[in-house]
Amino acid sequence: MSTHNIPLPPTGSTLTTKGWHQEAALRCLLNNLHPEVAEDRENLIVYGGNGQAARNHQALQDIIHALKNLENNETLMIQSGKPVAILPSHEHGPRVLIANSNLVPHWATWEHFNKLKDEGLMMYGQMTAGSWIYIGTQGILQGTYETFMAAAEKHYGEGSDLTGKLVLTAGIGGMGGAQPLAVKMANGVCLACDVEEWRIEKRLKTRYLDVLCKSFDEAIDLALKSVKEKKAISIGVVGNAADFFKYVYDKGIRPDLVTDQTSAHDPLNGYVPHKMTVAEALALRTSNPAKYVELSKLTMGEHVKAMLAFQKAGSHVFDYGNNLREGAKQVGVTNAYDFPGFVPAYIRPLFCKGSGPFRWVALSGDPEDIRVTDEAMKKLFPENKKLHNWLDKAQEMVAFQGLPARICWLNYGEREKAGLMFNQLVREGKVKAPIVIGRDHLDTGSVTSPNRETEGMMDGTDAVSDWSLLNLMINTMNGASWTSFHHGGGVGIGYSQHSGMVICADGSKDMDERLKRVLNSDPGMGVARHADAGYEIARETARKSSLKLPSLKINS
Amino acid sequence: MSTHNIPLPPTGSTLTTKGWHQEAALRCLLNNLHPEVAEDRENLIVYGGNGQAARNHQALQDIIHALKNLENNETLMIQSGKPVAILPSHEHGPRVLIANSNLVPHWATWEHFNKLKDEGLMMYGQMTAGSWIYIGTQGILQGTYETFMAAAEKHYGEGSDLTGKLVLTAGIGGMGGAQPLAVKMANGVCLACDVEEWRIEKRLKTRYLDVLCKSFDEAIDLALKSVKEKKAISIGVVGNAADFFKYVYDKGIRPDLVTDQTSAHDPLNGYVPHKMTVAEALALRTSNPAKYVELSKLTMGEHVKAMLAFQKAGSHVFDYGNNLREGAKQVGVTNAYDFPGFVPAYIRPLFCKGSGPFRWVALSGDPEDIRVTDEAMKKLFPENKKLHNWLDKAQEMVAFQGLPARICWLNYGEREKAGLMFNQLVREGKVKAPIVIGRDHLDTGSVTSPNRETEGMMDGTDAVSDWSLLNLMINTMNGASWTSFHHGGGVGIGYSQHSGMVICADGSKDMDERLKRVLNSDPGMGVARHADAGYEIARETARKSSLKLPSLKINS
Ligand SMILES: NC(=O)c1ccc[n+]([C@@H]2O[C@H](COP(=O)([O-])OP(=O)(O)OC[C@H]3O[C@@H](n4cnc5c(N)ncnc54)[C@H](O)[C@@H]3O)[C@@H](O)[C@H]2O)c1
Ligand SMILES: NC(=O)c1ccc[n+]([C@@H]2O[C@H](COP(=O)([O-])OP(=O)(O)OC[C@H]3O[C@@H](n4cnc5c(N)ncnc54)[C@H](O)[C@@H]3O)[C@@H](O)[C@H]2O)c1
């Protein structure tokens, strides 16, 4: 079947189904497959390797058909991207329930999964691909912004941003390319190198990067000048991170933050060794892969040594989820893990407050509706400087892909408020159609992923996925519009389990109740999870709220 | 803490909590730990190795306290037997949500689990231990009865039982000891050997076995005579299964059914080799374990050869979930798997009809309430001979343990009817207190366990646990009183995932609605799962009902 069988999402304020929750599911499913959103529409791939929205074209057509005919007291069951049953239910709960890519642990390998996938029996759902709430690259940009702002607040005090601060990083490819813009949005100076010039040029064109300098010195000089002037700017330069980081260090420069997003997770096809041209590296990659990997890891060793030197000299250094430390450790840098990963360093304290990537989509398709919500958010949280800054910059710098959407991180307590406010905007006709509220599976209460989001939990419960299941259950009970449970998102089959939640604010009184419950209990489970693990911030968050944690004797 | 801190379950018709769903959870939790029910009360172990009801004594007290104070718009979250949160919810859904023993697949080993357990961070929930709906040994008896009745119906036609039929088996220990009584309840003749005389005597005392014969010949003669007279009887004899089965075969006797429940899953500590006395075997077990295992497997080889010979001669032969075939195969019996396991042979066709182990408990504590429900069930299903037979025999032969309870297998459609009928009995005061309805996690729609319940699925989806999760989600949404998701029940950590459901009929109109939905969608997911895998019986079941299966274009 060819792609023109995939309709665009309906827009406007008229229903094409029997209710707004079905409609929201349909519009979001088709938005995931929107030409501006999906990485590979023909193959139903949304993002993240091969994260799909539906198992195959027939299943997609069957889902569309089912959603169009689904009554308000029925629920559609999706098993790895295929509609397997419609069951009698009731109107105050999910219209769709989704389980993707789940395998009994002993069989949870890529090998077994791919065998089933090849036979048409399964689908890889990633996180928001198979659960129908991906919104394009705004997500990574905002997540990166949030990390840098969290770093600023941690090191320079609440309410701080990166004004007058220098961030040194490397790797500005597909995801890492969000770094320069995110730092600039945080009002800092970003100095970034990448080994490939065409990558840097791509960032220039899309305005994710401001300047490409001709030499290390030119880049450094511009960076230092901008820091002095407190001017937000992003500066790129061609170079290998191992060389550039050492060069900066040797010049006596001490950036405030140092990190890296080269593709070090893949020493053969991602990371590029130094002391040779990229062309030479590409040739070696095919002629002698073993040698290539050896040199790659040796380069990582030098790269990490420079980062450790910065750390010793007072810079705040962190790993950005690319496994760079492991490569360095393997070639003898025994203290490679002396600098922390970004989750324990910056994100976990946010998770402890029940904070996470809250997102919303204007079902009308009208960008004006998002502008209205942006303004309303600013009014709702007048004190939240970080949020105001993000929303202003996002309005200016972020192009919508598919249905207009917005993302920002909100705490436990705030999400509930925002949800009720959106419902009121819909009720009062301030926006043209209902607003859909969702989140990434990467959130405070929803994901168990011992190599990333739950790495190094205080009590050692990194792999305990009871928490993700409880999150799924309470959101399903409390009346989300659709919920989901996936396996293998982010880090691959065998390594994670996580739950999704999407809820549609249709302006009704009933949705006031459901929004209040769901947007309380969803992040509430995150606070409970971190409080139980021993994090004092989470316990304090619970104490200051009405969240009851019986085994900790908090509020109960 | 000593056991007298564990209260007995409250009984009678007066609430000790703020609603009947909390009350049901409290009574069932404490019933799981009732002295007549729990295997090891002091350690909170209910059954099945170390399947626990709560993580530790402190957690148990905290759960009791939480249930006693839980409002009707709150939900208690249990993580591996500990009460971790109370969240705002609503009155038409679960009062308790439970996730036990779940680990991200890569870490899902006994080793990692036990480490966490030793640190007090997890608990093994088995199936109904941690989900608070175990009812004692009636379950295994009824499951065994159901298997033998399914065999009778398959081989001798619908409505048939084992009248005038001879069943040959071995191993009448803890679970296998249910075989003689189950065959007798099915009106057949059971001829069973066990290598240990004291085991047989134990069955005689508890009336699970009628006669212990002194010799092989005496046992065989009595069995043949009883078959001729169509007299239901169970006959035991001391002997090794490998020897006795061959002896029976060589005598030219061809039993109708042949199976086995020796502990062949454990060749060292369970199964006993032949050509030596039990005393000699016990000595060898410690002096030379390797040799013991070798002889054990060689004995399994002979044992299976005899079973294959019976099969070739026309007997219906099946494996009863003890891994006997594997042991035989390992010593060169290449065709050991020529006879099937009991699930593909007899249980799966039941699962295809949405049938499974439906159970109910009289919260009043009064046995008379169960008598009333027994009679009402017979009236509700006047045509179901198998059910009538079971209920009559159960009334006569099954002693209650803890709160009076009953179990029987009901199909898709029937469960809904039974639930509504129970709710009416409560409403009309025909019983003294609400009735709790639950089921094993071993059920048509709830379990994924590739070495047992989902072994050899037609389409190869043995390990796809999306189905168990969908079952969890729809029951949670549709308003069960509590739901649960466990890992590792039955077959151990790493090898299964399964969901539980319990719903309390309190006589209200609201519960009519919830019972109708839950008891429809719960087995409905089972029918959907088997229909999707290609089983025609399941597709036919769906077609004859109103169950909508979109991807199969059934009713939709
Ligand atoms: N939140 C997270 O944990 C998170 C988010 C996004 C990305 N990541 C990780 O960050 C890494 C980058 O992701 P991506 O999608 O941008 O990958 P990508 O392959 O698109 O980009 C990597 C970039 O690194 C450059 N590079 C490689 N070796 C280099 C070297 N030695 N010196 C300088 N530049 C070099 C490449 O030219 C390329 O532009 C990956 O390892 C990914 O897993 C983590
Ligand atoms: N539904 C199921 O799949 C299911 C249910 C229950 C039990 N089982 C399996 O059945 C087996 C028995 O379970 P149990 O709880 O009764 O175990 P158990 O250890 O209590 O009893 C096993 C009995 O077998 C006897 N035995 C051992 N070797 C023998 C031999 N060679 N010949 C004759 N008798 C011998 C022992 O004396 C003992 O009485 C186990 O392997 C168990 O996993 C499966």
Image (cartoon, coloured by chain):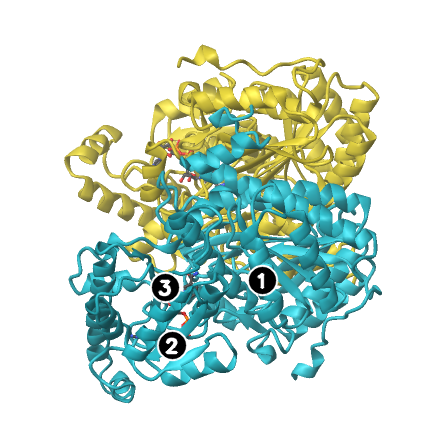
Chain colours: A cyan, B yellow
Residue B103 left/right relative to B384: left
Q: Chain of mark 1?
A: A
Q: Which residue appears farthest toward the front when viewing the image?
A: A229
User: Quick one: label 2 or label 1, which is nearer the N terminus?
Assistant: 1
Q: Residues within 10 Å of mark 3 (few under 14, many from 20)?
A: many
| Ligand 1 - quadrant of the structure image | bottom left
Residue B116: mark in rendering: none
Tag shown at residue A167: 3
- Viewer-nearest of labels 2 and 1? 2
Which mark is first along the chain, 3 or 1?
1
Which image quadrant for residue B543?
Answer: bottom right
- Is residue A547 or residue B386 the one in the foreground? A547
State the image coordinates of residue B517 (x, y, percent, origin top left): 75, 42
Label 3 within 8 A of ligand 1 by Cβ? no
Q: Which residue is mark 1?
A: A80
How much space separates mark 2 and mark 1, taking CA atoms?
A: 42 Å
| Distance in Å between CA atoms under marks 1 and 3 | 42 Å
Q: Residue at x 52, y 61 (%)?
A: A142
